Image (tube, rainbow, N blue to C red):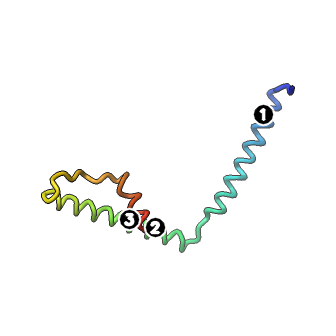
Amino acid sequence: MSIKTPERSQLRLQILINFMKKQETDLNKELAMSPEVYQGMVEMLTKAKDDYEHLMFLAKKRQQVWPGLVALDPQEVMPKILRGL
């Protein structure tokens, strides 16, 4: 049975912190984007926002046709739009 001392606990914690920092650095390198990829993502998200605004416009316009239509929730609509991209 090992004896837990503050020094050993501190050392284990420091090892864990160092490991997590390395993992974060590695992940950041993997996620690093070229300017072209970043610009493509910005364009896709801008298009998704425009599509959402258009859907909201159509929903407001057609409320007379579909009396039961409730306002579209961005939390539901945006993932569907993004999946379609």
Indicate the position of residue 80 as horizontal and vertical percent values: 39, 60
Determine the residue positioned at 36% across, 53% down: 76
Q: Quadrant of the C terminus?
A: bottom left
Instruction: Tell me the residue at 85%/25% (across/down).
Output: 3
The foreground one among 8 and 63 is 63
- Residue bearing mark 3: 48
Amino acid marked by disc 2: Val
Secondary element at tag 1: helix
Label 1, on which residue?
10
Give the residue number, with chain letter if any, for mark 2.
42
- Give the camera-side residue of 54 and 43: 54
Comparing marks 2 and 3, which lies closer to the viewer? 3
Q: Nearer the viewer, residue 28 or 81?
A: 81
Q: Is residue 9 left or right of residue 53?
A: right
What amino acid is at disc 1?
A: Gln
Distance from label 1 to label 3 (Cα)? 48 Å
- Quick check: 2 above or below 76? above
Residue 75: assigned label? none
Q: CA distance from mark 2 to mark 3?
A: 10 Å
On the rendered structure, is 58 left or right of 83?
Answer: left
Residue 29, given in percent of the width and then of the height, sits at 66, 62
Q: Which sits earlier in the primary sequence, circle 2 or circle 1?
A: 1
68 left or right, relative to 82 = left
* Mark 3 surroundings within 10 Å by alpha-carbon count, few (fewer than 14), some (14 through 19), many (20 or more): many
Quadrant of the rendered structure where residue 50 is? bottom left
Residue 13 image-quadrant placement: top right
Q: Earlier in the sequence, mark 2 or mark 3?
A: 2
Q: Residue furthest left?
A: 64
Task: Tell me the quarter of the picture where residue 47 sits.
Answer: bottom left
Going from N to C along the chain, the mark reached first, 1 or 3, is 1
Q: CA distance from mark 2 to mark 1?
A: 43 Å
Three-letter amino acid code at disc 3?
Answer: Ala
